[in-house]
Image (cartoon, rainbow, N blue to C red):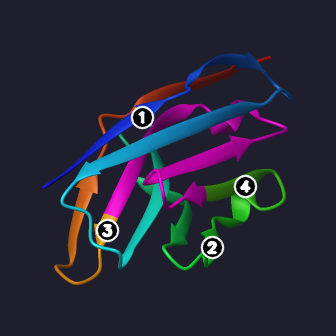
Amino acid sequence: QVQLVESGGGLVQAGESLRLSCAASGRIFSANAMGWYRQAPGKQRELVATISSGGNTNYADSVKGRFTISRDNAKNTVYLQMNSLKLEDTDVYYCSFYAILTRVRYWGQGTQVTVSS
């Protein structure tokens, strides 16, 4: 089992920045991918950004150039730096840990990001 603890959500104005953090603990294999997804009420959860244990990144088109994902493997922590936030970035953001060998995905509890005008 892997446990994920997220932090850093909140209320900001459009154009401002936020940084999300997610720390993983438990049975962590070295081959994994961590990332962030977001979900609005009544909508499907969508990918925001992912990063492999080797540092390969993937971003949704809607956040490219504004969001940066990074990780600290020694701390089993992934970060999401969100700049130039827009109203449409308002969502619940979920941290994800994908164990490649077991093909099991774990989710954090979610953190609310609200962008106001």
Instruction: In this rendered view, identify the residue nearer to me: 27 or 7.
Output: 27
| Tag 1 residue | 6
Distance Cα–Cα, label 3 vs label 1: 16 Å
| Amino acid residing under circle 2 | Thr
Pointer 1: residues within 10 angstroms few (<14), some, or many (20+)? many
Q: Is residue 43 visible?
A: yes
Coordinates of residue 22 in the picture (x, y in percent): 45, 42
> Measuring 48% from the left and 57% from the top, which residue is drawn there?
74
Q: Which mark is residue 98?
A: 3
Give whichever of discs 3 and 1 has the lower sequence position: 1
| Tag 4 residue | 68
Residue lying farthest to the bottom in this orientation:
101
Q: Along the horizontal axis of the image, is 61 left or right of 14?
A: left
Distance Cα–Cα, label 2 vs label 4: 9 Å
Give whichever of discs 2 and 4 has the lower sequence position: 2
Distance Cα–Cα, label 2 vs label 1: 19 Å
